[in-house]
Each structure stands twice: as C-alpha cells, then as structure tokens.
C-alpha cells in the first residue's frame, strides 16, 4: 500500500505572535499624503500651499541671501535701477520732449510710476524662469509647484520696499505729502503681486514646454512698459484708444500708486477694471499651470 502524505496547512501568524516592534507599531488613522486624480476644474489647492508655507519662507530667505552675495554694491542695485531710469527719462522726456504732468514735478511723477513697474517686470522675469531653475528640486521631492514662482515674486517685494525709500526722499524734497489716498497702498501692492504671480505661473509653465517664451518675454515687457502710463500721463492717449488702454491692468495700478503716494484724484473705474482683469488672468493662469 502506498503511504499518503498529508500537506501541511499554511501557518498563520497571529498579531500576538509578531515581534513586539511590529505589534506595537502606531500607525496614523489617516494617511499623511493622499494621491488622487485631480478634477478638471481644480485650480489650486490652497490648503496644500498653506501647509508648505515654511517652504515658501525658506525659498525666499535662500534667494535673498544669495542674490547680492558676490556683488560690490549689493542691495544698492535695488535703488539704482529705478533711479537711473528716472534720470534718463527726465533728461530725454522731461527736458527735451517736455512731457506735461500738471502741478506734479516730472521726476516725482516718473519715479512713482517706475517703482511699481520695476517690481512687476523683475518679478515676472525671475518668476518665468523659476521652474527651470528649480528643476533638480522638483524632480527629487514633492512640493506644490506654485510655491516656486510665488517665492520668486515675494523676493522682489523686498526690492519694492527698499526702493520706496527714494520716493519718500523725493516727496520731501519737492514738498509733496500723501493724503488719505495712501490707505489704498496695501490693496495696490496686493493687486500687483497677484498680477505678477499670475503671469509668473503662466509663463513658467509655458517656458518648460516652449523655450520661445523666455526669448519673447523681454520684448513683451518692453512693449508693455510703453503701453502703460509710466513715462507719460494718461491724457496723452487718444480718445479712440481709451477702451484698449483700460483693459491693460497696469493702467489702473500705476495710476493708483501715483494717487496713493502723491495725493492725486483716484480713477475708480480704472481700478475696478484692473482688478477684474487681474482676477480673470489669475484664474486662467492657474488653470493652465495645473494643466501643464
């Protein structure tokens, strides 16, 4: 007779038989990171960005420490850039062309417009290359991608604050003091920062896929500067082009800064239109950024 061999039953390990280090392992009830398919209409995860706010702080602090580390003049470059542009335009437009700015001295009128423009152009220029510059970090660790262009824009806000000291000195020299319009300044800084973040996010995403974006950006910014009331007042624009001029969000922002600093009348319609265009551009940029 053949001897029948019984197959042993699979051995089951009970939780009580596991090593103490595995048995006493304290796992969280909810996973730390949840990876889900995003919905098509999701623009940004505000909660996720808020959870990474310390990363935003350290990125800003890193860039601030490294920017002028090997320069001779250091932070003085922040003041010299708008100041030298004011000097050049004052000579060629204020003295030769004689641009009329009413009772406001032309150097003061000019610097009040160049101050927000310098912040905006520098923020968009650095923000558009931010993803390419941080490519090694992006491919190694997970982080909300929007933090990177937002950090590039936030760094330029420090330049704006430093360069504002020169405007205060000019105002004291010409004997012009701000009125109640200065209360608009925080809202104007927020608006131009949101506009810079919107364009930085849009252009940084496009620049990763289409490198022509970085080549065309300086030309676009140069044209945008002369299409905005920075070196000339708004009344120089022909009436038939007024509707197109209103669509430019920088029109209301630049005029708002002049009103806040110099006590000029506020163009409420221009400010309202610039806010609407800025919000629409921000929504569109977030959609393109998430899609790409």
Image: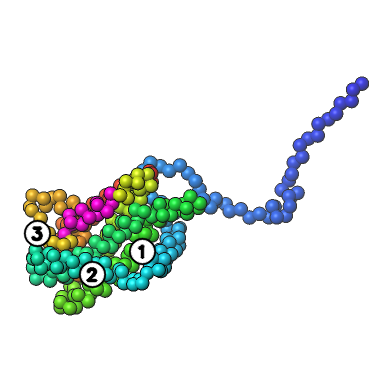
Q: Was residue 223 drawn as part of the magenta stretch in this picture?
A: yes
Q: Earlier in the sequence, mark 3 or mark 2?
A: 2
> Quick one: 159 or 261, which is closer to the camera?
159
Colour scheme shown: rainbow
Mark whose residue sits in front, 2 or 1: 2
Confirm whether residue 55 shows in the render.
yes
Q: Residue at x 71, y 48 (%)?
A: 15
Where residue 99 appears, x then y in whole percent? 9, 64
Query: On the picture, is 264 further left or further right than 132?
Result: left
How far apart are the alpha carbons under marks 3 and 1? Answer: 34 Å
- Quick check: 93 above or below 147? below
Q: Residue at x 47, y 53 (%)?
A: 136
Query: On the picture, is 109 further left or further right than 124?
Result: left
Q: Residue at x 21, y 66 (%)?
A: 85
Where residue 259 appears, x then y in whole percent? 17, 66
Residue linked to disc 3: 235
Q: Residue at x 26, y 74 (%)?
A: 165
Residue linked to disc 2: 83
Q: Was residue 107 drawn as part of the magenta stretch in this picture?
A: no
Mark whose residue sits in front, 3 or 2: 2
Q: Quadrant location of the N terminus?
A: top right
Q: Earlier in the sequence, mark 3 or mark 1?
A: 1
Residue linked to disc 1: 155
Q: Quadrant location of the C terminus?
A: top left
């Amino acid at each position: 007779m053949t001897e029948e061999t019984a197959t042993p039953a699979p051995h089951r390990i009970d939780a009580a038989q596991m090593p103490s280090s595995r048995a006493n392992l304290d796992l969280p009830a909810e996973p730390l990171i949840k990876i889900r398919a995003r919905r098509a209409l999701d623009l940004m995860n505000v909660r996720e960005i808020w959870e990474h706010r310390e990363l935003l702080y350290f990125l800003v602090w890193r860039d601030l420490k490294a920017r002028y580390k090997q320069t001779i003049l250091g932070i003085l470059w922040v003041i010299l850039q708008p100041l030298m542009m004011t000097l050049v335009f004052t000579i060629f437009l204020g003295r030769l062309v004689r641009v009329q700015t009413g009772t406001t001295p032309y150097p003061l009128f000019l610097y009040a417009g160049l101050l927000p423009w310098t912040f905006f152009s520098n923020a968009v220029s650095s923000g558009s290359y931010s993803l390419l510059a941080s490519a090694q970090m992006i491919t190694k660790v997970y982080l909300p991608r929007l933090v990177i262009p937002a950090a590039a824009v936030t760094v330029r806000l420090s330049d704006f604050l430093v360069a504002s000291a020169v405007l205060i000195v000019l105002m004291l020299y010409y004997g012009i003091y701000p009125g109640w319009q200065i209360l608009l300044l925080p809202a104007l800084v927020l608006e131009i920062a949101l506009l810079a973040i919107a364009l930085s996010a849009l252009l940084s995403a496009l620049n990763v896929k289409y490198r022509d974006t970085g080549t065309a950006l300086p030309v676009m910014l140069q044209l945008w500067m002369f299409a905005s009331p920075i070196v000339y007042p708004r009344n120089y624009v022909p009436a038939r082009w007024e509707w197109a001029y209103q669509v430019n969000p920088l029109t209301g922002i630049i005029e708002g800064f002049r009103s806040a600093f110099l006590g000029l009348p506020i163009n409420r319609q221009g400010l309202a239109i610039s806010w609407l265009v800025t919000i629409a551009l921000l929504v569109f940029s977030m959609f393109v950024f998430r899609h790409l």
